[in-house]
């Protein structure tokens, strides 16, 4: 909903026109499936228009200005300022110390690895083979008896606020990133308190029972991006910020149980990945 109703159109700049555009989009959203399909078509047209403009290059003066700024170090300073203002201290310091490597690639980009040139889109297709329906024999059989009793969770408003203070990461398919979610959860007074209560109720309910896929598929959706590994590429799915917030709140309450159940099999369960950090340190020294 956020991405469709708040999608910025570069041609609309006046405040009054922006307000009218948002109101008309909200009206379309309330019309149901047909209105949402219209919103999707409009958002797609805006994205294609912006993409084609960036590909063409709107003016040579802009590219020359960017080259001059890069030579003078102004582009790095601008990135540093933006990261610091957004609370991304770690990424900001990496810009100044020249440790920020890689970046996000487009499907039409190319990269070189071991002397050969590859296209990003073709490499992604090779990394994502066609889907297959899994066979029952390939799935691990779960015992019907002897499973531990599901312990009810209680996630509070304070838990949501504590997790939101440290929340980081890019936006998922909705375009709502961690910085925007942190502002919505912590900085808007009464509305933020109501949002924290609703998120706490949702996290508590999701920790108590299993939802149908149709109920949570929007929450579990990911945005596929391609990262430059220098050399090579890595496909990464970026989930919704709300999903990360709820997941961290649940893990905050169940950390010890997760560590005991998963052991060293799943480092994302709150365990410290010391070995992995050592490997990265040795690679960096080389």
Image (cartoon, helix red, strand yellow):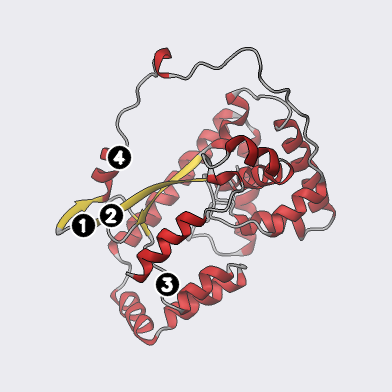
Q: Nearer the viewer, residue 187 or 262?
A: 262
Q: Nearer the viewer, residue 90 or 211?
A: 90
Q: Going by the image, does 197 lie left or right of 94? A: right
Mark 1 sits on what residue? 113
Give above or below for 30 relative to 23. above
Mark 2 sits on what residue? 232
Q: Residue at x 62, y 42 (%)?
A: 243
Q: CA distance from mark 2 to mark 1?
A: 6 Å
Q: Nearer the viewer, residue 286 or 176?
A: 286
Q: CA distance from mark 3 to mark 2?
A: 18 Å
Quadrant of the snapshot with the N terminus: top right
Q: Residues within 10 Å of mark 4 (few under 14, many from 20)?
A: few
Mark 3 sits on what residue? 99
Residue 82: x and y, percent?
55, 72
Q: Residue at x 71, y 59 (%)?
A: 165
Q: CA distance from mark 4 to mark 2?
A: 12 Å
Q: CA distance from mark 1 to mark 4?
A: 16 Å
């Amino acid at each position: 909903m956020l991405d469709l109703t708040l999608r910025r159109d570069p041609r609309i700049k006046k405040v009054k026109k922006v307000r009218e555009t948002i109101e008309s989009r909200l009206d379309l959203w309330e019309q149901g499936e047909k209105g949402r399909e219209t919103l999707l078509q409009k958002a797609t047209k805006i994205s294609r228009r912006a993409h084609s403009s960036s590909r063409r290059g709107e003016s040579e003066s802009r590219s020359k200005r960017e080259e001059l700024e890069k030579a003078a170090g102004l582009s790095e300073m601008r990135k540093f300022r933006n990261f610091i203002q957004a609370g991304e201290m770690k990424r900001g310091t990496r810009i100044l110390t020249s440790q920020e490597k890689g970046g996000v690639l487009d499907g039409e980009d190319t990269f070189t690895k071991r002397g050969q040139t590859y296209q990003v889109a073709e490499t992604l297709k090779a990394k994502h083979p066609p889907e297959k329906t899994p066979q029952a024999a390939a799935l691990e059989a779960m015992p019907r008896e002897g499973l531990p009793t599901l312990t009810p969770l209680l996630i509070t408003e304070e838990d949501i606020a504590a997790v939101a203070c440290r929340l980081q990461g890019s936006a998922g398919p909705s375009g709502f990133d961690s910085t925007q979610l942190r502002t919505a959860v912590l900085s808007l007074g009464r509305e933020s308190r109501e949002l924290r209560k609703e998120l706490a109720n949702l996290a508590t309910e999701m920790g108590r029972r299993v939802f149908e896929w149709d109920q949570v598929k929007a929450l579990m959706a990911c945005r596929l991006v391609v990262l430059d590994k220098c050399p090579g590429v890595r496909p990464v799915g970026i989930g919704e910020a709300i999903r990360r917030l709820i997941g961290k709140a649940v893990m905050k309450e169940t950390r010890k149980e997760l560590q005991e159940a998963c052991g060293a099999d799943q480092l994302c369960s709150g365990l410290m990945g010391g070995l992995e950090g050592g490997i990265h340190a040795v690679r960096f020294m080389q």
